[in-house]
Image (cartoon, coloured by chain):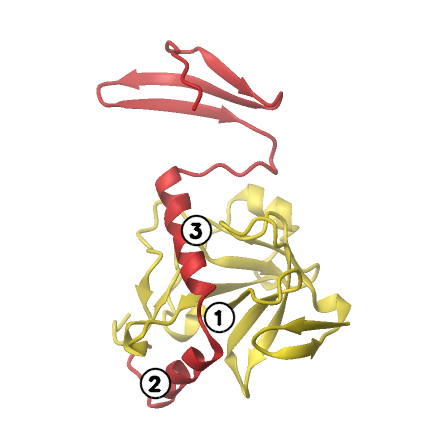
Chain colours: A red, B yellow
């Protein structure tokens, strides 16, 4: 990991078109401003990781699993 | 068009029905093209089958069947990217994880799939400040 020290209002440029600026520094947290092309997605890491993990779990679901699930919904499973 | 799939064998589909996820799904960024397949005769559960990986398919469902008040607000960037101008332009699906105990199955409400039904462009959207989770129990939670 490249570690750089920045002061408030200083920036970092990545790959010519992503710019990260330190907008505000407070006790315990830093506010970052990010400029990037629209097609570049930006996520808080913990959210990105949670969704990725869930996607990976979901990719393991089998055709048999769905049979179990449909039976429950047919019984009028109380999810509505 | 025909492709081979692990779960369904060879399937046939219309080229116009191919859905393109601009950045793929989170964690699966290299797989961008999918088709929706009905799971047996019941169209409320469907599979999102990758065209680029025969083994990759996600069980998806319309969230309204278990959470009618689920509301996905799209920001302007997403609307622009997917060319969405009205509510009729798109559908929302959520990915399911079926647990060993099917009563514990969950839906990812934090990262729904938004698909423009006209041009088939899609994205897995990350919702912020909504309180939705990646593991919403779909059965027995009441709401």
The chain containing the residue under callout 1 comes to B
The chain containing the residue under callout 2 comes to A
Q: Residue at x 28, y 76 (%)?
A: B101
Residue underneath mark 1:
B59
Residue underneath mark 3:
A52
Q: Where is residue B141 in the image (x, y as percent from the top left)?
A: 25, 71
Above or below B103: residue B42: below
Label 3 vs 2, first from the N-terminus: 3
What kind of element bears circle 3?
A: helix
Q: Residue A72 carries which label?
A: 2
Above or below B78: residue B58: below
Above or below B101: residue B126: above
What kind of element bears circle 1?
A: strand
Q: Position of residue B25 (x, y in %)?
A: 53, 53
Query: Which is more foreground, mark 3 or mark 2?
Result: 3
Q: Residue B122 carries which label?
A: none
Left or right: where does residue B49 sit relative to residue B141? right
Q: Considering depth in this image, is B128 or B107 the residue closer to the camera?
A: B107
* Badge 1: residue crowd in 10 Å (few <14, some 14–19, many ≥20): many
Q: Which residue is drawn at 66% across and 60% down?
A: B52
């Amino acid at each position: 990991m490249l570690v750089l020290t920045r002061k408030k209002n200083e920036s970092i440029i990545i790959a010519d078109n992503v710019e990260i600026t330190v907008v505000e520094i407070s006790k315990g947290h830093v506010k970052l401003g990010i400029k990037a092309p629209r097609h570049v997605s930006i996520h808080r890491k913990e959210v990105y990781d949670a969704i990725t993990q869930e996607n990976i779990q979901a990719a393991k679901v089998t055709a048999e699993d769905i049979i179990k699930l449909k039976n429950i919904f047919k019984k009028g499973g109380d999810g509505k | 068009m025909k492709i081979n799939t692990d779960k369904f064998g060879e399937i046939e589909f219309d080229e116009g029905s191919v859905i393109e996820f601009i950045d793929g799904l989170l964690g699966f960024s290299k797989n961008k093209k999918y088709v929706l397949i009905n799971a047996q005769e019941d169209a409320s559960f469907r599979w999102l089958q990758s065209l680029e990986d025969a083994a990759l398919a996600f069980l998806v469902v319309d969230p309204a069947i278990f959470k009618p008040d689920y509301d996905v607000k799209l920001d302007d960037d997403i609307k622009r990217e997917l060319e969405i101008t009205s509510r009729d332009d798109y559908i929302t699906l959520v990915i399911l994880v079926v647990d060993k105990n099917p009563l514990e199955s969950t839906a990812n409400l934090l990262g729904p799939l938004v698909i423009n039904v006209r041009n088939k462009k899609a994205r897995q959207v990350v919702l912020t400040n909504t309180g939705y989770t990646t593991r919403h129990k779909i059965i027995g939670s009441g709401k």
